[in-house]
Image (tube, rainbow, N blue to C red):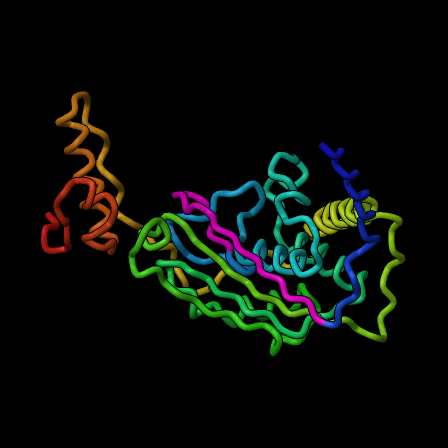
Amino acid sequence: LPLPRALPSRAPLPAAPPAMALRIGHGYDLHRLEPGLPLILGGVSLPHDRGCAGHSDGDAVLHAVTDAVLGALSMPDIGQLFSDRDPRWKGARSDAFVTAAREIMEGQGYGIVNLDVTVVLERPKVSPHKEVMRENIARLLGVDVGKVNLKAKTHEKVDAVGENRAVEVHVLILLENSPSSSPAPLASSAADLTASLYAAAQSRATSILSTAAGSDPAPSTPASAAPETSPAAPPPAPGGSVDALRRLEEIVAVRAREGDAAGSWTAKLLGKPVGKEEEV
């Protein structure tokens, strides 16, 4: 038998992503909603009885915006750059992440054409806060507010988002290469480039957070809005499968009072719908 031909040598990695005229990025984030936490979206503190669980401030809108910018640049995502295992980012305001991503983008010679944000949240209503969110995103990215769109959708009471147990955000962004800009010098390899940008992003975010306390605006809170309250779930009944089933029925009843659909997963699990007409 003839000997196999030698495999071709692996081509060297490019020094940097090619300088394309246009780049498209997509950002996505989802956070659980848990009682007793602040609900901060797009830099705005929304009145609600639950908020985003996260290592930082949990701002799913700004996280998705950050990921959209990084994705368009073929960069590591926000979870890699700002790990939830790193104590530096514990409770950190997410505007630092957006600003770090913007500076990387500008350093690579790109500017923003436009971006489109979709927030999927069952409650509370996002519409009254959309304009402030747009302004916050535009300020952090250094663009005119006319380049930022934000719309809100519900999930029609379907699954975790529809049952008000999570919030979901999608962002699309279009970048263009700016002929007048001077991009940063290219690294000798893709690995070196990624490492240098990695370090720059983390250093810049740390710097922003260290000076943010007295200079940058905190998440805005609507003055006239009062926090929403939902009926507390009854305490668990002691022992036994019958008590456990009763407890599950009580949870479904509470969710029905909160506006969840009769066809929610808990109602289906019990094998019978629990609607508003069955409230006690």
Q: Position of residue 86 (x, y in %)?
A: 66, 35
On whether residue 36 falls in the magenta region, the answer is yes
Q: Residue at x 10, y 55 (%)?
A: 277
| Quadrant assignment, res 67 | bottom right
On whether residue 206 falls in the magenta region, the answer is no
Instruction: Judge whether residue 215 can be spotted in this image.
Output: no
Q: Position of residue 206 (x, y in %)?
A: 74, 45
Q: Residue at x 18, y 45 (%)?
A: 253
Residue furthest front as drawn? 1
Q: Is 109 in front, or is 148?
A: 109
Q: Residue at x 71, y 59 (%)?
A: 73
Q: Is residue 125 left or right of residue 211?
A: left
Q: Is residue 237 above or below residue 27?
A: above
Quadrant containing the N terminus is: top right
What is the total number of numbered labels drawn onto the structure image? 0
Q: Is residue 236 above or below residue 147?
A: above
Q: Is 110 in front, or is 258?
A: 110
* Start-end of magenta stretch: 22-40
Q: Is 160 in front, or is 40?
A: 160
Residue furthest top as drawn? 239
Q: Is residue 28 left or right of residue 78?
A: left
Instruction: Judge whether residue 58 can be spotted in this image.
Output: yes
Q: Is 93 in front, or is 182?
A: 182
Q: Is residue 227 above or below residue 138?
A: above
Q: Is residue 51 left or right of residue 156?
A: right
Q: Position of residue 29 (x, y in %)?
A: 52, 52
Magenta-highlighted stretch: main secondary structure?
A: strand
Residue furthest bottom as drawn? 146
